Every structure is written in C-alpha cells, then in structure tokens.
Image (tube, rainbow, N blue to C red):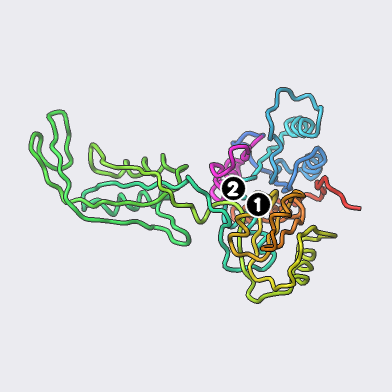
C-alpha cells in the first residue's frame, strides 16, 4: 500500500478541510508515492518515537498531535521537533498527523470517549457553523436522475444519518439560443419551453468543486443553469465535543470511579458535586474549556474534558459538574481510531501502537 492510499483513507474518515485554522493536519513528511512497510501509531512524536519506528522497521508514523505545528525557519536539531524531523528524513520515515479534523467528526476523538464510557444517543455538542451550502440545478426531466445521482456520488445530499437527500420540483424552463449556440433541445432564434426538474441538495462547502464538476459532466445543456447558496444551518454531524446518555442513571461517585477505571487515572479534578444522579454527559477530547457553556446549555449533568483553567471551574455555577481528566488522557484512545481505519483498508498490515509514554505531565 502506498502512503497516499492510507492518507486518502484517513481523510475520507476525517477530511483535512475540517481542521481548525490554526492547525496543521495531514501528511507532514514523506513522499506520497512511497510504499508503506509498516505503521507506528502514537499521540505525540518525539525522537524516541522515531527511534522506535526505526527499531521495528516501520517507515510511517501516524500521530494525533502534529509534529510540525508552528512555523519553522531553520532545522538544526535545537529542540525535540527539529530532532524528530531530521531523524525521520534521514531514515525515510513518513509522518501523518490527524488532529482537529479527527476532533470534528462524530465518530472521532470525542466519540471514542463516549464509546469508552458506554454512552448512547450521541450528538455533536457544538455543531460546525458556516460550512453548509445548497446547490440548485435545473435539468430536463429526461436527465434528472443521472444528474441527481452524480451529485450524490460527489458527496452531496447527506443530512445526519441519511444520504441521497434531495428536493425535486417539476416546472417549465424557457430559453432562446442565438446563432452561436449548440442547443441540446429547441431551435436557434426561437423561444423554447422545456419540462425541467429543479433539484436541490445540501453539501459541505469543501466539496463544492467536485459536486459542480460531477454535475456539469453529466448535464446535457450547453449552458447549465445552477445556483449555490450559503445556508445558516449548523452541520449536525460535524463539530467539536459530544453528548451522550447512560441507559440508567448512576451516582456521581460511581461516575468518577468509571472515569478513573476506563481512562487509567490516578486522580482527576472536578468542580463541586451535587449528590444527584448522572444521566447525560458532555465530553470533549483535549483542551475543552471553551465548550463549558455549550455543555451547560446541552442539559448534561457533567462535562468531561482536559486542560480546564482555574477560573473556568467557576462557570459550573451549580448547574453542571466540570471534570478535568487531562489532555493526554482524554485523547489516548485516538490511536484506536487510526488503527481501525488502517485495518479496514488492509487487515494484514503491520501496525504497532507506540510503547513510548509521551505524556509530558507527571503526578506525584
């Protein structure tokens, strides 16, 4: 399998276009045309992780956190990033990082937290805004099905758990071709009335080009009449954080013990307890302080994330329990997401989880 094939599989699952503006997800080092001998999966990349890949004869490292995050003006080996880059390039090791794009999909980082806790009825906590568009195209009735299917194949028409979603309205279109035209129907210089179907469907903005190209390729008209609108709807299957519910309520202390057990925690930090049962839970992998208000508004009794600041705990305001399980701890199972994607692509592939503990935070 070539590097580009695996990259395509990762980005079909979590398109790199979904990453936050500050991020740097994607293939960071390596020739996409090279063959993969084996993959090492980790959360962070350090020189020790690259050495581990070399030792096990694995020529690709897949990480959650980007190795190259800030701008590099020189590479002299002055820190762990530059040392890792030099070591990877010298040993022809490719590096792929799937960061906030994997945070943005419903079965990504936060979804994995929900899975480990056994939560059901999952929903995005903060659905992505300013992402959806609608395409409207007018096509002769005879070609409506082929045009509609072409846009479906390009990725348009997905709404939640449903695909092939469209609205179709039959009507009559008019046009008059001039002498330079090559009309599909009608005659040059004469007003023509044609039975047409108006087809409309939603799509995420980052696939606009492929939707339009696929549609244009099969549309019979020389001049295609279509419109694209920006819609205000939030994308309910993409965004940050998740909410989920237990089948049965559980006491607060039992929930804290469940967290410690499932995430291997020696300790955790939390705001005041209420001595009330836990049913609905909000979560966000990584640094989730910015979603506290969204968690409160969701109706969850508890919010689980990492990197919660001191003053953020005051926002609990006796309405929700805020729990910090740690940044690394909340994202540790992201490795399983990468693994599952690789195994689905090639179940006989050589894949290892890194044995290096890259969590820089220790407790005493």
User: For residue 341: magenta?
Assistant: no
User: For the point 69% across and 66% down, which residue is it?
Assistant: 117
Q: Residue 66 is drawn in which quadrant? A: top right
Answer left or right for 189 relative to 276: left
Q: Nearer the viewer, residue 273 or 25?
A: 273
Q: Position of residue 358 (x, y in %)?
A: 80, 46
Q: Position of residue 282 (x, y in %)?
A: 64, 61
Residue range in magenta is 1-28
Label 1 crowding class (10 Å Cα cut-off): few <14, some 14-19, many 20+? Answer: many
Q: Position of residue 328 (x, y in %)?
A: 76, 50
**Residue furthest out toward the left:** 190
Label 2 crowding class (10 Å Cα cut-off): few <14, some 14-19, many 20+? Answer: many
Q: CA distance from mark 2 to mark 1?
A: 8 Å
User: For the point 71% across and 73% down, which residue is it?
Assistant: 276
Mark 2 or mark 1: name the one nearer the start of the chain: 2
Q: Is residue 268 above or below residue 155?
A: below
**SS type, badge 1:** helix
The image's mark for residue 284 is none
Residue at mark 1: 338
User: For the point 30% across and 49% down, which residue is it?
Assistant: 147
Q: Is residue 116 above or below residue 199?
A: below
The image's mark for residue 10 is 2
Q: Position of residue 345 (x, y in %)?
A: 59, 53
Answer left or right for 243 relative to 267: left
User: For the point 79% across and 64% down, which residue is it?
Assistant: 260
**SS type, badge 2:** helix
Is the residue under label 1 in contact with that under label 2 (CB below 8 Å)? Answer: yes
């Amino acid at each position: 399998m070539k590097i580009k094939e695996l990259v395509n599989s990762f980005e079909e699952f979590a398109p790199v276009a979904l990453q936050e503006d500050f991020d740097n997800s994607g293939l960071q080092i390596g020739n996409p045309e090279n063959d993969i001998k084996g993959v090492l999966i980790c959360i962070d990349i350090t020189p020790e992780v690259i050495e581990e890949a070399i030792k096990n004869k694995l020529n690709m490292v897949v990480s959650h956190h980007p190795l190259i995050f800030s701008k590099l003006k020189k590479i002299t080996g002055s820190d762990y990033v530059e040392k890792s880059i030099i070591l990877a390039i010298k040993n022809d090791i490719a590096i792929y990082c799937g960061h906030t794009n994997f945070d943005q999909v419903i079965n990504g980082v936060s979804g994995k937290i929900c899975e480990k806790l056994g939560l059901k009825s999952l929903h995005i906590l903060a659905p992505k805004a300013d992402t959806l568009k609608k395409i409207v195209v007018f096509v002769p009735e005879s070609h409506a099905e082929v045009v509609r299917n072409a846009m479906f194949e390009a990725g348009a028409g997905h709404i939640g758990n449903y695909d092939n979603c469209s609205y179709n309205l039959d009507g009559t279109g008019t046009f008059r071709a001039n002498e330079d035209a090559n009309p599909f129907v009608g005659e040059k210089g004469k007003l023509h009335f044609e039975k047409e179907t108006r087809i409309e469907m939603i799509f995420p903005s980052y696939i606009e080009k492929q939707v339009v190209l696929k549609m244009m390729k099969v549309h019979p008209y020389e001049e295609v009449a279509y419109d694209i609108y920006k819609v205000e709807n939030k994308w309910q299957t993409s965004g940050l954080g998740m909410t989920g519910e237990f089948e049965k309520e559980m006491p607060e202390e039992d929930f804290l013990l469940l967290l410690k057990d499932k995430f291997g925690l020696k300790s955790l930090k939390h705001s005041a307890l209420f001595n009330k049962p836990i049913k609905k839970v909000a979560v966000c992998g990584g640094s989730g302080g910015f979603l506290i208000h969204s968690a409160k508004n969701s109706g969850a009794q508890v919010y689980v994330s990492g990197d919660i600041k001191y003053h953020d705990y005051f926002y609990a305001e006796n309405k929700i329990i805020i729990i910090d399980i740690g940044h690394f701890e909340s994202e540790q199972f992201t490795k399983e997401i990468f693994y599952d994607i690789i195994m689905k692509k090639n179940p006989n592939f050589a894949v290892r989880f890194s044995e290096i503990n890259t969590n820089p935070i220790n407790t005493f």
